[in-house]
Image (tube, rainbow, N blue to C red):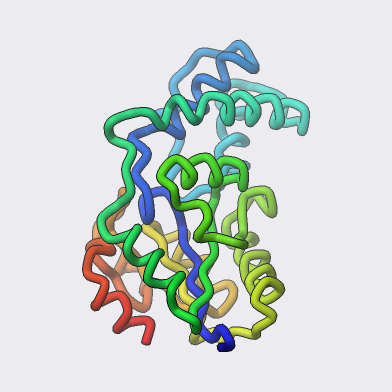
Amino acid sequence: MQKTTLLLWDIDGTLLASGGAGMLALQTGLRSALGIDGSLADIDFAGRTDRWIVRRIFEKFAVSHTEENFHRLIAGYLAALPAALQNPHARVLPGARALLAAAAARADVAQGLLTGNLERGARVKLGHHGLWDYFPFGGFADDAELRNDISPHALRRAQEHTRATFAPTRVWVIGDTPHDIACARVIGARAIAVATGSHSREQLAAHAPDAVLANLADADAFWKLIA
């Protein structure tokens, strides 16, 4: 059966809560790779890409933004991430696991990632919870620094992987920030905002998504939107 519906998932705050693991791993990597010990609490991570976040870190600590320094920090971050995820607050968010499994079982649905994570970081985070294998393709921070520039890469890879062309009205981006809504619009896609991150339902609704859900626990409500 031809794939006709495409779901593109955000990770942090949508599928997973990592209990601050990402920030902790970046702080650890900053210390181990560049010898800098400082707080990152004033940097807004929500909906941003790893490349954007690294740029802000380098600006804050007056580090030259070279590819060498970027790769040094990212290597330190990735080395620290598995241990950082071993905290009691890292979890799959309500309903997410069941929805991913249901989507994978549908012959008409393809699903991938549209995330600000680097692909290697996404693999570690999702793999920690046994979810990585649901995503054969995606758009990542490896593709671009700005989230809006990642969307076309995710759509292109979806079409290459499935050998299908998805009508814009059949492409859904699911995320927890206004940035997810904006990056959906770049490719003409629809947007489902989920209030499981740092933004309330009211804050998300102000950015005019196609729907706002409190969480992903109500599978029937989710599939009624997609239908």
Q: Quadrant of residue 167?
A: bottom right
- Give left or right: position of 204 versus 73: left
| Number of numbered callouts drawn | 0
Please say whether residue 222 is visible from this viewpoint. yes
For the N terminus, which image quadrant? bottom right
> Measured along the vertical axis of the image, is residue 208 above or below residue 150?
below
Q: Depth check: 135 or 14 in front?
A: 135
Query: Where is residue 14 shown, x and y percent of the image?
Result: 37, 55
Residue shown at 56%/83% (left/top)? 3
Query: Where is residue 9 shown, x and y percent of the image?
Result: 47, 62
> Measured along the vertical axis of the image, is residue 159 above or below residue 150?
below
Query: Where is residue 111 shown, x and y percent of the image?
Result: 51, 69
Q: Quadrant of residue 19?
A: top left
- Give left or right: position of 100 versus 217: right
Please say whether residue 202 is visible from this viewpoint. no
Residue shown at 62%/59% (left/top)? 139
